[in-house]
Image (spheres, rainbow, N blue to C red):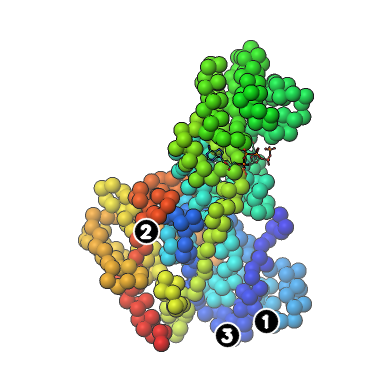
């Protein structure tokens, strides 16, 4: 790592604004910021929340060192009062976030920070980079895992990740979204994610011929022998040599050939041919793994071609979310203390979709009582309650003529408090619990929302009171 303490990982304007807020006497005013996003990567129907555990680590360890303060002093921009504030800095905000693994939708608050303006503003950059990155990869991984229809997906992308953090945390996020494991060893050490591994072409090239290479591997790892068969020629050399090793080396030891990996060529064609050859040799239990620039689109295509693949190794297109590589979460001020009360703030835009939803808010998910299907999400003013025993009307955030009456539902509040006045109250969960929760919650979404292309737009509506507040502010600030 470049540094353990990431307090100074912030856009410089957060520091100039913090100093300015203090100088102007507004630094201690209570402010509320929401993180939300507007577009789902790959045009999908939903995204997956991830990165909260790393955000918690950052917030728990916020501390300006003497070095940081000296560096800032040397900029000749900041007051001594501000530098002293930083020296004794103590995080004291309330923070709420969606649980990791939660399917989430554009326009809803996914993280809310409430506290002294100077602090709530300062953490913007890290809130965004942490949640944006891991949510991007978890969302991509969920698409890939769904395309693979239950077949094993191993994350193989470390070498192509955009930095080592992106490799380590990308493996974590990929697991949350549905990948079964990773080739990234440190991610198993740190997070307990199952490692997967086969062999590189260099192993095969290291020996005089392919058979000797496979034989050497089988002798070293008789219980987990999965060989890479495309170094020379898959069908004429790789698969026959794999079969020969299974018969001549492994079977006499009472062991089985675990699998072969295809890493080039027409994977559908080669996998079908290889499957036949393996089956005819009595190796029905030998799995076929495929890799080579895979993603959800190619995997889906391979499934349509009836490719005989049991496991997918997915690298660059997963770890970089190559086809849609930005998660555009933003962090906006939604309320500020005025005369001892929180006054809502709005950001107006020519583009109606970009107008922010003002105020300190809560978020609920409505589920059908009989089927447990997710019906809609509802953004309310903070503290609004919902009577589950009466019909409830929700309002489209933009078009006032669009409203929906929901019946026969139950609701779950989605934002969990993770810091209370700066004290961490986050309940840590194991990565397996998070992954299970993610897959279970994705299964509550309508099939139409799960579609890869042109999915149905899931409702993220407003309560009546919030809708009224938003239109009052729109009236006030439009000219
Ligand atoms: N049957 C198939 N249907 C759809 N896509 C496929 C199929 N087989 C392979 N692909 C994909 O096509 C692309 C082919 O990659 P590439 O051009 O590198 O060819 P290659 O045969 O792997 O060559 P190289 O030996 O240089 O790796 C990869 O993304 C691979 O996953
Ligand atoms: O294509 P990706 O989805 O990123 O999957 C990972 C790739 O990384 C390896 O190739 P590399 O050429 O780096 O090494 P190798 O010699 O072991 O194949 C592996 O063989 C895959 O092709
Ligand atoms: O173990 C493998 O087969 C592997 C690991 C990383 C990248 N490509 C392949």
Q: CA distance from mark 2 to mark 3?
A: 44 Å
Q: Residues within 10 Å of mark 3 (few under 14, many from 20)?
A: few
Q: Which residue is mark 1?
A: 81
Q: Which residue is mark 3?
A: 25
First in residue order: circle 3 vs circle 1: 3
| 45 w.r.t. 253: above or below | below
Q: Which mark lies nearer to you, 2 or 1?
A: 2
Tell whether circle 3 marks a residue whose Cβ is less than 8 angstroms from ligand 2: no
Instruction: Name the residue rendered at 57%, 85% in the picture.
Output: 25
In this rendered view, identify the residue nearer to me: 100 or 150: 150
Q: Which residue is mark 2?
A: 457
Q: Which mark lies nearer to you, 2 or 3?
A: 2
Q: Ligand 2: which quarter?
A: top right
Q: CA distance from mark 3 to mark 1?
A: 12 Å
In this rendered view, identify the residue nearer to me: 189 or 394: 394
Occupied quadrant, residue 352: bottom left
Q: CA distance from mark 2 to mark 1?
A: 50 Å
Question: Which element carries disc 1, helix, strand or loop?
Answer: helix
In this rendered view, identify the residue nearer to me: 339 or 199: 199
Instruction: Name the residue rendered at 44%, 37% in the picture.
Output: 304
Instruction: Name the residue rendered at 28%, 47% in the picture.
Output: 371
Instruction: Name the residue rendered at 59%, 62% in the picture.
Output: 129
First in residue order: circle 2 vs circle 3: 3
Question: Which element carries disc 2, helix, strand or loop?
Answer: loop
In this rendered view, identify the residue nearer to me: 187 or 460: 460
Rendering coords of residue 303 (x, y %): 46, 37
Question: Which element carries disc 3, helix, strand or loop?
Answer: loop
């Amino acid at each position: 790592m470049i540094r353990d303490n990431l307090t100074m990982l912030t856009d410089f304007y957060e520091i100039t604004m913090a100093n300015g807020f203090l100088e102007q006497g507004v630094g201690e005013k209570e402010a509320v910021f929401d993180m939300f996003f507007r577009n789902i990567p790959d045009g999908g129907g939903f995204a997956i929340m991830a990165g909260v555990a790393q955000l918690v680590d950052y917030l728990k360890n916020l501390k300006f060192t003497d070095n940081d303060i000296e560096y800032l002093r040397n900029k000749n921009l900041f007051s001594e009062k501000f530098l002293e504030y930083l020296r004794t800095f103590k995080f004291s905000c309330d923070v709420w976030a969606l649980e990791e693994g939660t399917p989430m939708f554009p326009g809803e608050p996914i993280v809310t920070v409430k506290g002294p303006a100077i602090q709530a503003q300062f953490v913007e950059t890290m809130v965004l980079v942490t949640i944006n990155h891991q949510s991007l990869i978890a969302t991509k991984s969920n698409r890939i895992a769904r395309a693979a229809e239950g077949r094993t997906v191993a994350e193989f992308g470390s070498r192509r990740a955009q930095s080592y953090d992106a490799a380590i945390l990308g493996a974590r996020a990929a697991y949350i979204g549905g990948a079964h494991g990773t080739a990234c060893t440190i991610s198993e050490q740190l997070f307990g994610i199952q490692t997967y591994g086969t062999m590189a072409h260099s192993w095969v090239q290291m020996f005089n011929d392919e058979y000797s290479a496979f034989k050497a591997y089988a002798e070293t790892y008789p219980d987990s022998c999965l060989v890479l068969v495309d170094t020379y020629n898959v069908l004429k050399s790789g698969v026959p040599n794999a079969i020969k090793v299974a018969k001549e080396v492994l079977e006499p030891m009472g062991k089985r050939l675990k699998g072969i990996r295809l890493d080039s060529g027409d994977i559908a064609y080669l996998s079908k041919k290889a499957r036949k050859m393996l089956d005819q040799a009595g190796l029905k239990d030998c799995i076929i793994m495929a890799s080579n620039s895979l993603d959800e689109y190619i995997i889906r295509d391979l499934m349509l071609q009836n490719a005989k693949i049991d496991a997918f190794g997915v690298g660059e297109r997963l770890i970089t979310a190559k086809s849609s590589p930005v998660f555009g979460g933003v962090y906006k001020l939604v309320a500020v203390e005025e005369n001892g009360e929180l006054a809502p703030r709005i950001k107006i835009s020519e583009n109606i979709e970009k107008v922010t939803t003002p105020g300190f808010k809560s978020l609920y998910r409505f589920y059908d009582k009989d089927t447990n299907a997710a019906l809609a999400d509802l953004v309310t003013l903070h503290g609004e309650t919902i009577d589950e025993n009466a019909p409830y009307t929700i309002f489209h955030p933009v078009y006032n003529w669009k409203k929906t009456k929901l019946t026969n539902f139950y609701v779950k509040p989605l934002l969990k408090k993770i810091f209370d006045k700066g004290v961490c109250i986050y309940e840590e969960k194991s990565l397996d619990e998070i992954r299970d929760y993610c897959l279970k919650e994705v299964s509550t979404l309508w099939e139409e929302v799960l579609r890869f292309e042109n999915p149905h737009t899931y409702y993220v509506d407003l309560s009546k009171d919030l809708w009224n507040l938003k239109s009052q502010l729109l009236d006030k600030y439009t000219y």
